[in-house]
Image (spheres, coloured by chain):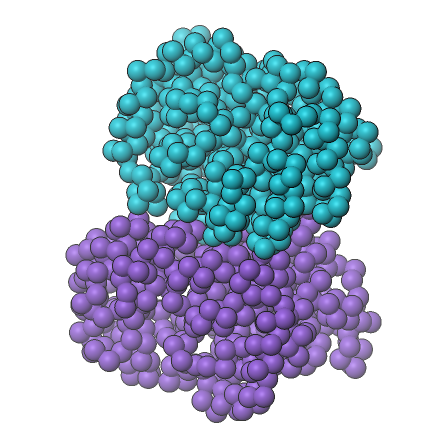
Chain colours: A purple, B cyan
Amino acid sequence: MDVSDVRFPTSRSLAGSDAMNLDPDYSAAYVVLRTDGAGAGDGTGGALEGHGLTFTIGRGTELCVAAASVLERFVVGMDTEELFEDMGGFWRRITGDSQLRWIGPEKGVIHLATAAVVNAVWDLCANTRGVPLWALLAGMTPRQLVDLVDFRYLRDALDEDEAADRLAAMEPGRARRIQHLQADGYPAYVTSVGWMGYDESQVRTLCEAALAEGWTALKMKVGRSAEDDARRAGLIRSVVGPDVRLMMDANQVWDVPEAIARTRELARFDPYWMEEPTSPDDILGHAAIARAVAPIRVASGEHAHNRVMFKQLMSAGAISVCQLDACRLAGVNEAVAVMLLADKFGVPVCPHAGGVGLCEYVQHLSAFDYIAVSGSLEGRMTEYSEHLHEHFVDPVRVVSGRYQLPSLPGYSAELLAASRSDHLFPTGRIWAGA
Amino acid sequence: MDVSDVRFPTSRSLAGSDAMNLDPDYSAAYVVLRTDGAGAGDGTGGALEGHGLTFTIGRGTELCVAAASVLERFVVGMDTEELFEDMGGFWRRITGDSQLRWIGPEKGVIHLATAAVVNAVWDLCANTRGVPLWALLAGMTPRQLVDLVDFRYLRDALDEDEAADRLAAMEPGRARRIQHLQADGYPAYVTSVGWMGYDESQVRTLCEAALAEGWTALKMKVGRSAEDDARRAGLIRSVVGPDVRLMMDANQVWDVPEAIARTRELARFDPYWMEEPTSPDDILGHAAIARAVAPIRVASGEHAHNRVMFKQLMSAGAISVCQLDACRLAGVNEAVAVMLLADKFGVPVCPHAGGVGLCEYVQHLSAFDYIAVSGSLEGRMTEYSEHLHEHFVDPVRVVSGRYQLPSLPGYSAELLAASRSDHLFPTGRIWAGA
């Protein structure tokens, strides 16, 4: 296992800027797993790699890199087929170390790092099997899927048997839904038109371009002064017209009463949802906001750090949109857990993406959710941001506002070797002179 | 600022063992701040030090050490008097870095590390003023105390003005309550009789010794098999009799329905509270358990990672006992925030302690809570565990089950230089041969 610190200097253009995150440098703690070839079950006898990352925004990436290195003990030296046979057991071991658990548990740096390692193992598994990650998951039986998930702390909402029953009920339509996605793609919305740091003419130009590309749903950042938010919302609405879905994202800057008041003020611009109106830890606060601003939906999840938080956000009616994150949660296993919970509570999953690698990841999760879990596209949209895809070996393809189903083996987050070395922090070409 | 990794090999004796934490090595990411003397306002012109730690249990301490080092930028080079004049502003800066925030926010490794740095700054401030930390806090006006706290995300429960009013109402009795603590000490309970890894004769001997020392409240670990828990509870009850308060601590091992069933089974041993019955993130789960097992109290907090979690745990009626942790929260400022919330919700603060340095820390917080915030000892007990105090310059003193008010300047968590060097991981004398 190798871990590296890869950072893109996005703060130079203010791409990704919002009311809380003023100057992010989109970054990754990047994990590469290498087999010695002997265990690779692909029949070629050759060594395979698994690549995984956790998304960060600059300073602090080095801590996730260090944490991923600490987790090496749960992966290195294992027989890959033994690992792949019991991915649920692997997940419980890597999240359950009795000493490391203290510095989470299941949150923050150690959990973000766990995502990078877990996602790398899944990439290795999908590469070994020669299928994209979504297809690997969609090929599992209900019981195999249930076995991926740690149901501890979930059983008051959903237990193994009920989850298996729900998955079994969806099993007959899987093939048809795969065909549907292959033909039509998965619905998406675009975020990169409305970063906080962009000026008005930039926003206008980007909105016009988005419409021309076929987007029918887009997101803007709010959370500065009320006047500023209203002016920017008015500008965007005036460009895109009344029929485009306009999502708003406050990135956690408000108190609960402030969130209610500010969302009501912005209601005249017809927001489809208000995202992260307050602290991501404030389940009851989100619930109070949701009650007060209905029918405007409350969306959250990119900072919801584990399945226990999502269980509560959904059981309390605090969110109407589940924005799980492929790296904030500890990788594929926990994302599956949250999709099962969302299905149980009838909350559509609209994953958080953007950043670097998140679009590449969540396209698989959304596809799997439709194929095997929810069986529905109703109210589902996967986030899309246009930045940094050129650095990936197998970048996402979006056509007329829809993600095209990935077809290459793996989990799609492999960065080009040149991109990795150029952006290695702090010694790569991009940073050495900075 | 120097940061070091200090570990005590407690797993060799199973001190500290429980159902979740099988073999902890009590450890600390340990911060030392040094002034250049010029800014020390003590009139001596000499350089002063501030010592701070965050408590960990072995593996992963190195990540907290690395994180504390990242936070150096918020402290080193500052004028100490400028820092001490605006400790609230300092706290908002160190928790509010727009890039580092992503890897929390306000949770996990970065938050634990923040505690070490913040606590070191408070130690330096108290040393500079020549007073113990509790006295430094108890000498502040209500408005100065309110200014220490970041009220963002709290105002739906408690705002600055109400907090100041509540503190002002308690101000007249401060001097009398200080006298009371100086005379009688602060009530405590003892945990070190009932570690999970101890055998029955060990537990019996320790309980008898505790009674002889004057303890009237003690805690045992539960969460293994129902039979095992009942046998150990029966043993302890038989030794200590019906009048001693017996607390039980499940250390997060149960699901919600399991916690309810198991607590009811243990009710016949008259537990004063059931601690951490399920995931520390499960606010609604704790609330459901609390409703189901009343009148047995539900206690939690040692893993409640910030003030937003405590706000909800208390507003939802999920806990009847607030077990704030001096290091899980980001140091003194956030502990003050949680004490203000606990007072508002009428929940007694019984801080989590034990570990290494936690008893030394929380004696100050409990004293301040009584002197200036709650004004009450009703239902208050500070945890005590007998381990590792011999390594501190100014160890806690407990007499007949009560903490004696500390009198030396500072926040009491300075480790002896020899203890630090001996236990430095992995090169110190204790570890080099292991």
Residue at (31, 63) in percent of width and height? A274
Q: Give x and y (percent) for residue A394.
A: 55, 77
Residue at (78, 77) in percent of width and height? A41
Q: Give x and y (percent) for residue B311.
A: 40, 43
Q: Is residue A99 above or below residue B419?
A: below
Classify residue B265 as left or right of residue B43.
right
Q: Quadrant of residue B25?
A: top right
In the foreground, A203 or A100 = A100
Classify residue A150 as left or right of residue B363.
right
Q: Is residue A196 above or below residue A256?
A: below
In the foreground, B234 or B330 = B234
Residue B296 visible in this rendered orientation of the protein: yes
Residue B125 visible in this rendered orientation of the protein: no
Classify residue B237 as left or right of residue B109.
right
Q: Give x and y (percent) for residue B196.
A: 73, 38
Q: Is residue A87 above or below residue B53?
A: below
Q: Is residue B428 above or below residue A404?
A: above
In the foreground, A195 or B132 = B132
- Quarter of the image that includes the C terminus of chain B: top right
Q: Quadrant of residue B29?
A: top right
In the foreground, B174 or B71 = B174
Classify residue A102 as left or right of residue A366.
right
Residue at (31, 25) in percent of width and height? B167
Q: Give x and y (percent) for residue A143.
A: 67, 74
Residue at (41, 32) in percent of width and height? B339
